[in-house]
Image (spheres, rainbow, N blue to C red):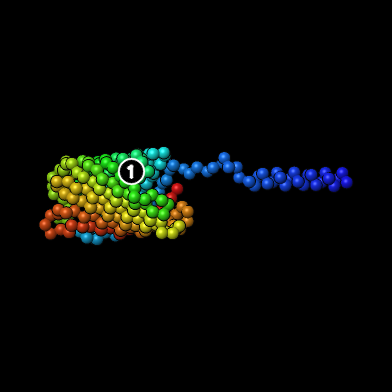
Amino acid sequence: MRKLLFASFSLLATSLAYAEEAIPNPLEIEIPSPWNSEIEFGYQAHSGNSDSQSLNSRLNAEYVAGRHRSSGEWKFYMLYKDGEEDKRQSTYTAQSDYKLSPKTYLYGNFKGVESRYSAYFKDHTLSGGLGYQFTNTDALLVELELGPGFRYQEPNLDEIKDDDIIFPETVQEGIFRGNLNVVWSVVNDLKLAADITAVSGPSNTRLDTDFNVTNNITDAIALKVSYARQYHDKVPEGLSNGDSIFSVNLLFIF
């Protein structure tokens, strides 16, 4: 009888020990990383004022902590025509936001473009203002930014060609910037996004639109299809006001 009681007590103690291991500790909460990074490689086909093909790369990082959100992006591509290098361009963007309320925030934005062969050797825009999030959920993000700023454009006089959208003067002027950003997660593995930016100053108004579809292949790899269009309201006579870029990229998320 004593052996039976001892065996029963041992079995009960062992079961309780396994049960304690199986029950998660409520204090052990997994905190998501404040960092979100992406690396992108792909192919571009240009149409409009130029017809060409190119390879491109992109690096993006975002940090969110408390009321602060900071992000940076760098794009680089080389353009070839008839087997020769025709363009080498770097585009870099940095932005910092500070939440004032659940829907409003202050922002500061800098965007720079440096190109070896295009009309503008340097094209820098600095802007700050107020942002408003109409909705910010896992399924849908809609936010609008408005604010003044300053633009500096230095023409690349040695490389100006007939198909360059430019007037050969250095631009230093105040501007007004507006940006609309929409991200919609249709299903878990499919995301649609649109980013529209307007920069207006005395010399020119430029409208950049970027539409993309991202389909997750795995948790860390996705296929991204993008269409981007750049529109100027003032261009030299005989040129188109818009240029478009279509790209199919492989996206790595970590």
Whole-percent x, y for residue 242 in the image:
21, 57
Extreme-right residue of the structure: 1
- What residue sits 41% from the left and 59% below the top? 186
Image quadrant in which you'd find residue 243:
bottom left
Whole-percent x, y for residue 61 in the image:
38, 44
- What residue sits 79% from the left and 44% below the top? 9
Q: Looking at the picture, which amino acid does disc 1 mark? A: Thr
Whole-percent x, y for residue 138 in the image:
42, 52
Whole-percent x, y for residue 248 in the image:
35, 59
Circle 1 packing at 10 Å, graded few (<14), some (14-19), many (20+), is some
Query: In the image shown, does 134 or 207 lie closer to the viewer?
Result: 134
Q: Secondary structure at mark 1?
A: strand
Q: Is residue 139 shown left or right of residue 209?
A: right
Q: Residue under circle 1?
A: 104
- What residue sits 14% from the left and 47% below the top? 203
Q: Is residue 222 shown left or right of residue 164?
A: right
Query: In the image shown, does 166 or 56 lie closer to the viewer?
Result: 166
